[in-house]
Image (spheres, rainbow, N blue to C red):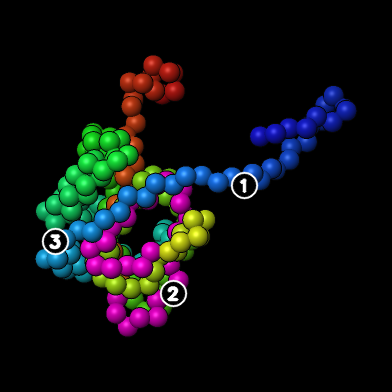
Amino acid sequence: MFKKYITSIDQTQSFFTNITYPRNVNIFHGHYPEVHELHNLKLLIDEKLKTNLDKQQTNIYAEKTEFDVLNDSEVVKNFLGYVHKQISLSPGGQFIKLWNEMFVMQTWGNRMNKGDYIKNHVHNCLHLILYLTEGVELFLPELEMSIVPKPGDWYLLPPHVLHYSNKSTSEEARYSFVCNLTEKADWDRLKELNLY
């Protein structure tokens, strides 16, 4: 915080400063070619959808599964293994070589029906999206771009990238599988620094 000191010894005044700056954003993306796995994941999402949506607890104004209910399924493990391999072999992807040792994964599935939408929001971690069907596009306003969903397309977004979807006008549901990858805390290092 910037502080400006007033002439009186006992008074300080705080100001808010907004700084706009460009930043580089790396988005890993590709196509998952296993069509039967996309179909099986769509069926799994249908099976695990929540019956009651608490709109105060999520940015997704659509049907979704509980968090982590998909983690143990073979189809999810296969997809995450595929993405891990693709990213670790690509330029700039070496940071993800120790995927399972570095990250805690939180997964869920979405089904957007006509009239559903996703509020503008960010994730404070890596955010992986796999599209299982076509449907309403995902907007990334600060990057001035959008993603048009195609079955099998996946995107790994860095932390703090704003994104949202407008209300769906399609009679067909848009399905997606989502995974947050949060870095695991290094407790030994935090203790060494007296932060824990």
Q: On the picture, is 50 further left or further right than 13?
A: left
Q: Magenta stretch?
A: 147-173
Magenta run includes residue 153: yes
Instruction: Specify which label sits upstream in the sequence, 2 or 3.
Output: 3
Evaluate whether residue 166 shows in this view.
yes
User: Closer to the camera, 142 or 122?
Assistant: 142
User: Closer to the camera, 4 or 194?
Assistant: 4
Q: Residue, x 34% and y 76% (percent of image)? A: 113
Q: Amino acid at mark 1?
A: Thr
Q: Position of residue 81 (x, y in %)?
A: 17, 47
Q: Amino acid at mark 3?
A: Glu
Q: Position of residue 96 (x, y in %)?
A: 27, 38
The local crowd at label 2, few if under 14, some if 14 to 19, many if 20 or more residues have their Cα within 10 Å, is some
Image quadrant where one finds the N terminus: top right
Instruction: Specify which label sits upstream in the sequence, 1 or 3.
Output: 1
* Furthest residue in direction right, as rendered: 7
Q: CA distance from mark 1 to mark 3?
A: 42 Å
Residue indicated by mark 2: 167
Q: Position of residue 71 (x, y in %)?
A: 20, 51
Q: On the picture, is 97 further left or further right than 124?
A: left
The local crowd at label 3, few if under 14, some if 14 to 19, many if 20 or more residues have their Cα within 10 Å, is few
Instruction: Specify which label sits upstream in the sequence, 1 or 2.
Output: 1
Q: Position of residue 188 (x, y in %)?
A: 33, 21
* Residue 34: assigned label: 3
* Residue 36: assigned label: none
Q: Residue, x 23% and y 59% (percent of image)? A: 31
Q: Is residue 15 above or below residue 177?
A: above
Mark in front: 2 vs 3: 3
Residue indicated by mark 1: 20
The local crowd at label 1, few if under 14, some if 14 to 19, many if 20 or more residues have their Cα within 10 Å, is few
Evaluate whether residue 175 shows in this view.
no
Q: Amino acid at mark 2?
A: Lys
